[in-house]
Amino acid sequence: MKRLFILLIAALGLTTACCRQEFENTDPEGFASLIADTSIIVLDVRTVEEYEDGHIAKAINIDVKKDDFAKKAKATLPKNKTIAVYCRSGRRSANAAELLAKKGYKCVNLYGGILAWIENGKPVVQEGGKI
């Protein structure tokens, strides 16, 4: 019985280690503080249409669902800067942050996405002006 317990604990430890997240998550307050630093790159990974409907100021738009996401990211994003990533609800940006982190980028994901950002009263801009 003791051996079974030890094997179970060891298996849980290995499972946790292999599934370790390689990027950070933060809430809208933390994200706002982070992007106040002008050296941080803000990355919106939604579609162009979603981006144009409203985005965080100074965000670069690269659609994570496009086949050329990795290529565009490599050409656009410097590896020596932190990338603050967001999408609509946080799912696509978590996927993008994971992909970028595996390629050597330091990423921080906006947990809850732009929906949480707006819900917390944070500003967004639309092509042509603020919302």
Image: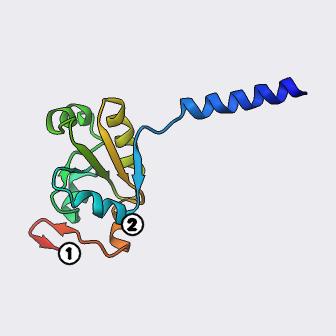
Q: CA distance from mark 2 to mark 1?
A: 16 Å
Give the quarter of the image for residue 86.
bottom left
| Three-letter code for the amino acid on which mark 1 is drawn | Ile
Q: Residue 87: image x %, image y %?
A: 33, 54
| Mark 1, residue position | 131
Determine which residue is flagged by label 2: 116
Q: Amino acid at mark 2?
A: Ala
Could you tell me which residue is drawn at 34 percent across and 42 percent down? 96
- The x, y position of residue 4, in whole percent, is 84, 26
Assess disc 2: are there few (<14), some (14-19) or many (≥20) residues with their C-alpha within 10 Å of its C-alpha. some
Mark earlier in primary sequence (2, 1): 2
Residue at x-position 55% and y-position 29%: 18
> Whole-percent x and y of residue 105?
29, 36
35 sits left or right of 97 in the view: left
Where residue 113 sits, quadrant-wise, is: bottom left
Q: Residue at x 11, y 72 (%)?
A: 129
Please determine whether, in this image, residue 129 is positioned above or below residue 7: below
Query: Of discs 2 and 1, which sits in the foreground?
Result: 2
